[in-house]
Image (cartoon, coloured by chain):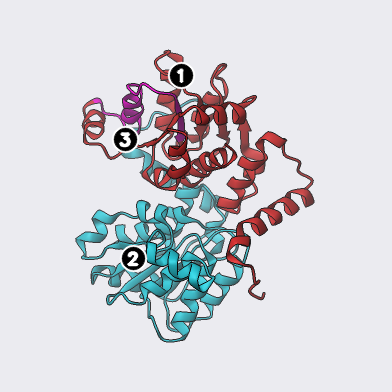
Chain colours: A red, B cyan
Amino acid sequence: MEIEIVRPEEIEKRSFAIISEELKAQGMTLPEDQEAVTKRCIHTSADFDYARNLTFSEGAVEKAKEAIRHGASIVTDTQMARSGINKRVLEQYGGQVYCFMSDTDVAEEAKRAGTTRAVASMEKACALEEDLIFAIGNAPTALIRLYELIREGRIAPKLVIGAPVGFVNVVQSKEQILTLKDTPYIVARGRKGGSNIAACICNALLYQC
Amino acid sequence: MEIEIVRPEEIEKRSFAIISEELKAQGMTLPEDQEAVTKRCIHTSADFDYARNLTFSEGAVEKAKEAIRHGASIVTDTQMARSGINKRVLEQYGGQVYCFMSDTDVAEEAKRAGTTRAVASMEKACALEEDLIFAIGNAPTALIRLYELIREGRIAPKLVIGAPVGFVNVVQSKEQILTLKDTPYIVARGRKGGSNIAACICNALLYQC
């Protein structure tokens, strides 16, 4: 297999063209409003499973874009996702990215309560007085606590990105989010996900704004 | 599916136990020295493909551990991987993590030479006068340039982690690394990989030191 000569600025375009071709060859058609998000997840992971496992509440993409345009911030449960989200674009609309996972008060509260830092960081997010998108890419415990906080009426996210990854309560935590009636969500059903997926869903939304 | 009650400090252990069970059920036995790295990649991605696509040069893990213990630093091509690598553990042995992707001189050099920032950041790494592990989790262009620099004798990495992800020259860039005779490598063959995989391979090595 020879190295293909592609100009730097053409690489991403070429990648998306290949993804489109292969989806077509597999007989898969994506809903138009979901296409950019789903293709970017495949681009980030080279895993076509995301064409099947990504689940969107009705109008989720449009609602998220509107929230971003109105200055919503993003809360994430991983420093890697924070690092990967395009903060330059988000800041243009007035939002910022929060990750409380390394905060001393979060570590102390988690220890005191015998819970995870991810849970404690969701509690901390409740105190933010602004519109919020939650991008959960690691801890199912964060997503479970977020679900409870929504049910208790303590927080009303503009969007929940449910993409924790792994083997313990990951599937369950995502299925719970799908039962929410008034909360827009984008959920990667099943075990797969990760900080890269959480970040790239945010970026796919940002690049459409 | 009910939420499983698992104490926070037990979640990772439980996850690795599930991974071990499922590998066994699939009839897969991993070489003992590769086990920790491969299982951590599955843990990070929930993708059992890594049990098949990870390819290790002989003694790569042992050589990498020795390099880390002797203070080797890590160069990566993504800020997300830099963010995900456990710098606290690396620093205990005297190493640090470099990522030149956002450096102004790298951007300028890439523009001047009509290449990618990833290529320019590999060139920049040549000037580092210390033992280096390269963790490539995004750009095949970085891995291709690294291969050339090794062949030209301009750099002699203690380990190359080849885990770029995607559709343009990704497969090819990894296959080239497998042809190197004297360079230890851990390569995720095929299209899959990513900053999360590059970071978690580093962490799997660090946690064994």
| Residue A125, position as x, y percentages in the image | 35, 26
Count neighbours of disc 2 (C-alpha within 10 A) and say few if under 14, some if 14 to 19, many if 20 or more: many
Could you confirm whether marks 3 and 1 are on the same chain?
yes
Q: Amino acid at mark 3?
A: Phe
Q: Amino acid at mark 2?
A: Ile
Q: Going by the image, does B9 lie left or right of A152?
A: left
As helix, strand or loop, the secondary structure at mark 1 comes to: loop
Q: Quadrant of the N terminus of chain A?
A: bottom right
Magenta span has A116? yes
Task: Please tell me in which quadrant of the rendered image residue B60 appears.
Answer: bottom left
First of labels 3, 1 by sequence position:
3
Chain bearing mark 1: A
Which contiguous range is marked in magenta? Answer: A113-135
Count neighbours of disc 3 (C-alpha within 10 A) and say few if under 14, some if 14 to 19, many if 20 or more: many
| Residue B176, position as x, y percentages in the image | 55, 76
Tag in front: 1 or 2: 1
Q: Amino acid at mark 1?
A: Ala
Q: Going by the image, does A61 lie left or right of B40?
A: right
Spatial CA distance of label 1 from label 2 is: 41 Å
**Pointer 3 residue:** A100
Q: Quadrant of the C terminus of chain A?
A: top right
> In front: A53, or B99?
B99
**Residue A156 — which label?**
1
**Residue B142 visible in the picture:** no
Spatial CA distance of label 2 from label 3 is: 26 Å
Task: Please tell me in which quadrant of the rendered image residue B191 appears.
Answer: bottom right
Chain bearing mark 2: B
**Residue B26 visible in the picture:** yes
Q: Going by the image, does A174 lie left or right of A38?
A: left
**Pointer 2 residue:** B74
